[in-house]
Image (tube, rainbow, N blue to C red):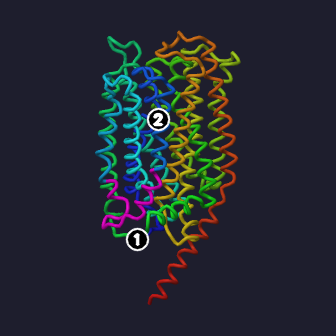
Amino acid sequence: MTISTDRVPLHIKLFHGIGSIAYGVKDNGFSTFLLLFYNQVIGLDARLVSLALMLALFVDAFADPIIGHLSDRTYTKWGKRLPWLYIAPIPLGLAWILLWAAPASLGGWIFAYLLVIAIMVRVLVSCCEVPSASLIPELTRDYDERTVIMRYRYLFGWAGGLAMLFLGYIVFLVPDADHAVGLLNENGYWNYGLVGGAVIAIATLVSARGQHKRVAHWPDKRPKKTSVRESFEEIREALSHRAAVILFGAGAIAYINQGVTFTISNYLYLYVWEFSQTAFFYYPILLFASVVGSFFLVSPLTKAFGKRPVAIVGGLVGMIFWVIPFALNLSGAWPAVGGTASTTLVFGFTFLATTGSVVTMITAQSMVTDIVEASELETGRRTEGVFSAGWFFVQKCGTGLGIFAAGLIVSLSGLPDKAQPGEVALSVIENLMIFYAVMIFILAISGAWIFSRFPINRADHDARVAALAAAKAAVHTTDR
């Protein structure tokens, strides 16, 4: 397929974005509910839950580059990526349902069950998300247009995740005769998993079908046959590119930060801020509003200042607004938790923090696509799949470490199993706040410094695109 340098039609951007709904549902479920479900509902020690999720992420992370490489080398009349997007979604949806249907009869085997099913879900998600994200450099070479497409991915990904979060809080995980706290309602998690599995499968298939006419073509070149050793060498060569190493390092830290924040959020909202059921109703709406804000901010910002400065400042802004509420609470300058004033302030700071953080993540993933041409100019190969997989590799490793760190924070703070909001010792609440705030402060500063070392800007990218176009024109002239 010939790569277009023109603007991508709106309907393609929309269908491409729809594909990220599956990832949003998965990511939100893993980061928001899974630790709480297996720890506080099923009764598995928080450290073991965190360990299982981290191990699953590491297994999946090492599978990602292989999946990316295989998708780069897929050669069909439907292109490189579509076959993956048609085959993987249904098995993924079924695995997702199983994740939220842990049999009580397993007893001591529940850790093994969680580990195996979590690995299945994550690997199958990669079989959808890596090929889907790899389409962006194929759709356009334009520096700014890639950010525009990426923001649609984030908009739909967050929309899917937050829609399921909303349904979880308001429809599935609600108090009943047996459960005074909705988030501890075991029956609700089964329904949450069932609906989520259907959404995952349908969204991915709709996305693939909507892009079919544009991307369903024989690739420009048939990949050469290579040995397993040569394949791994190509993967190693691509991922060791200087720009990739720097960006992946910054991305790993950003995702550790995000993993800690998402995983511990329900603990903070239940036990620190003592949200009411009404607050949980509005919380997903608030998060989606911040994502919409990021959607409209990111393109003008990156066009005006470039991607690297926006990634740096967005991350620092996000960290500042995350930390302020905890600092005020610990200093005694915060209104009574659980009240309208407290919840309103938490919502305001969360909106600003999330907006900054999402701007950084959209920009950073757009920066990944710009490494493709830098590598192609040096190696003569386009390895979109490998670079997308590399990003997901660090994303998953970072998220895994973040989830594990969140489990350690919960454990070290002294929070007891099946604790009831409002009945936890003040010292435990203070430990939660201090451990969390200090960790995200250190991570944000470290990530900003590494982002500052990224070597590709707009001028570099445009020069490489021009050089590649000239080289391709020269080859065509010679062939005549």
Task: Name the one closer to the observer, 146 or 11.
Answer: 146
Q: Residues within 10 Å of mark 1 (few under 14, many from 20)?
A: few
- Magenta region's main secondary structure? helix
Residue 206: give x, y in percent of width and height: 31, 50
Which one is earlier in the sequence, the residue at label 2 or at label 1? 2
Amino acid type, callout 1: Lys
Residue 217 within the segment the image draws in magenta: no
Direction from residue 151 to residue 97 in the image, left or right: left
Circle 1: element type: loop
Circle 2: element type: helix
Direction from residue 293 to residue 448 in the image, left or right: right
Q: Residue at x 53, y 9 (%)?
A: 423
Residue 448: give x, y in percent of width and height: 67, 45
Q: Residue at x 69, y 51 (%)?
A: 452
Task: Determine which residue is flagged by label 1.
Answer: 225
Q: Disc number at residue 53?
A: 2
Residue 254: give x, y in percent of width and height: 59, 42
- The magenta-colored residue range is 63-85
Amino acid type, callout 2: Leu
Of circles 2 and 1, the one toward us is: 1
Q: Residue at x 53, y 17 (%)?
A: 271
Task: Name the one closer to the observer, 155 or 110.
Answer: 110
Residue 223: give x, y in percent of width and height: 41, 70
Q: Is residue 290 visible?
A: yes
